[in-house]
Amino acid sequence: MMYSKIAEQIPPSPIRDMMCRAELYEDVISFAVGEPDFYPTENIIEATKTSLDNHEVRYAPGAGLLELREKYADYLTKSTGIEYDMSEVIVTTGGMGALFLGMLSVIDPGDEVLISAPYFSNYAQTVSLCHGKTVTVEVREKDNFVLTPEAVQKAITPKSKVLIINSPCNPTGSLISYDILKKIAEIAIKNDLLVISDEVYSHIVFDGQLYHSIVEFPGMKERTLIVDSCSKTFAMTGFRVGFAAGPEHLISLMTKLTEGVYSAGVTFSQRAAVEAFNSGMDHCEEMCREYEQRRNYICRELDKIDGISCIKPEGAFYVFVNISQSGMDAKHFSDHLLDEEHVAVVPGDNFGSAEGYKYIRISYATSMDNIIEGIKRISNFCSEYIAI
Ligand SMILES: Cc1ncc(COP(=O)(O)O)c(C=O)c1O
């Protein structure tokens, strides 16, 4: 039996691997998973139950429930100040569904997709599945892990078609400033790139900063596909409701392709998502405040540990910790930390960056008690194994 070369060659998810290994220890503290530890509010759960009680168990339309598309278009219009109509919105199975259908609709074999690295590792898999070529644009710690317009410009070739940006970023927690976004927008326009703007963490932004989307710049709405999701915003990962918003023709291609991919999203999950938007952003803001407190604690405590360092992330729920002074590479550090102290983190070289082996990713989407204990164990580990 011959299996597809692409399927065989794609590496398994390192994050899942770490999660499975972590499960072997009963007392493990896991900083590996990028999933909110909060639950959706009760009204969202009730709306799901009501939808099931009403037997909303049939196929939804390929582009999603009209009511939800309308809600999301309204929400996006308000949050970006740019007018969106529901014909420019598709509901997908999570942000992943939006990324996959979006890339499938724009990438021809050999097209180059520029991605700032380190990046969310699923991007590269999706690019490969679409027969595209990932071109990494390295970001540096000295630039707060933010993409520089010069690096983007330098990476562009005649085959460049798409640029993926992710702000706030998984795995670094970096936030692209308004001024840099503006310059990236100018480059996208000059070089005729489609920008996939992954905004799944747009509601997790700290220090009172305002979130800006690249669509806010003139000429960008027509060349941007926004990818969004209820997963992080409303702590609804298992509901699998995501969104893409972009040019009407692109959305119609994506809708056509749903047929051969998953036909339609889950009807009662979409009802729950309507309720989530109806109930507003209070819960989301509460979660954000809690993440911010956790970030403050982690950065303050990590700063006290010799041999590792981190810059303060501005959003999402990750810290990208520099372990280069430990004398270990990321894999060695992470393996040892799990074996010795039962703390799971993700080695930084799993995020597509050449410099990744110098970093580990800590996800603080876990309780404050776990964070306090986990950081204590990391501190023990460092004092035991790092010779300064
Ligand atoms: C940057 C980024 N984009 C997209 C996703 C996909 O999220 P979902 O498919 O749950 O909406 C994730 C999930 O962790 C992510 O970190």
Image: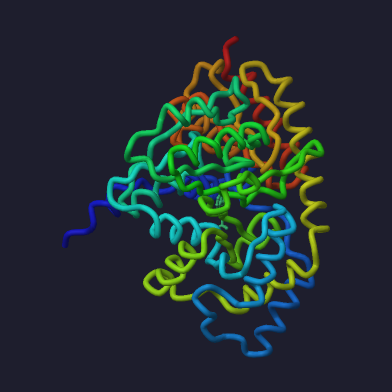
Q: In which quarter of the view is residue 254 placed?
A: bottom left
The answer to whether residue 214 is seen in the rendering is: yes
* Left or right, 279 with reference to 377: right
Residue farthest to the bottom, as pictured: 54
Q: How many marks?
A: 0
Quarter holding the C terminus? Answer: top right
Residue that appears at 65% across and 36% down: 175
Residue farthest to the top, as pictured: 388
Which coloring applies here? rainbow
Q: Nearer the viewer, residue 277 or 388?
A: 277
Q: Nearer the viewer, residue 6 or 224?
A: 224
Find residue 241 and report its horizontal and vertical position in percent. Answer: 59, 66
Residue 103 position (above or below residue 118): below
Q: Nearer the viewer, residue 53 or 202?
A: 202
Quarter holding the N terminus? Answer: bottom left
Residue farthest to the left, as pictured: 1
Residue that appears at 68% across and 36% down: 178
Find residue 38 and report its horizontal and vertical position in percent. Answer: 73, 56
* Left or right, 250 with reference to 360: left
Residue 339 position (above or below residue 7): above
Residue that appears at 53% across and 66% down: 92
Residue that appears at 55% across and 27% down: 148
Find residue 233 and report its horizontal and vertical position in percent. Answer: 69, 56
Find residue 3 and report its horizontal and vertical position in percent. Answer: 22, 59
The answer to whether residue 28 is seen in the rendering is: no
Q: In which quarter of the view is residue 231 placed?
A: bottom right
Q: Nearer the viewer, residue 343 or 126?
A: 126
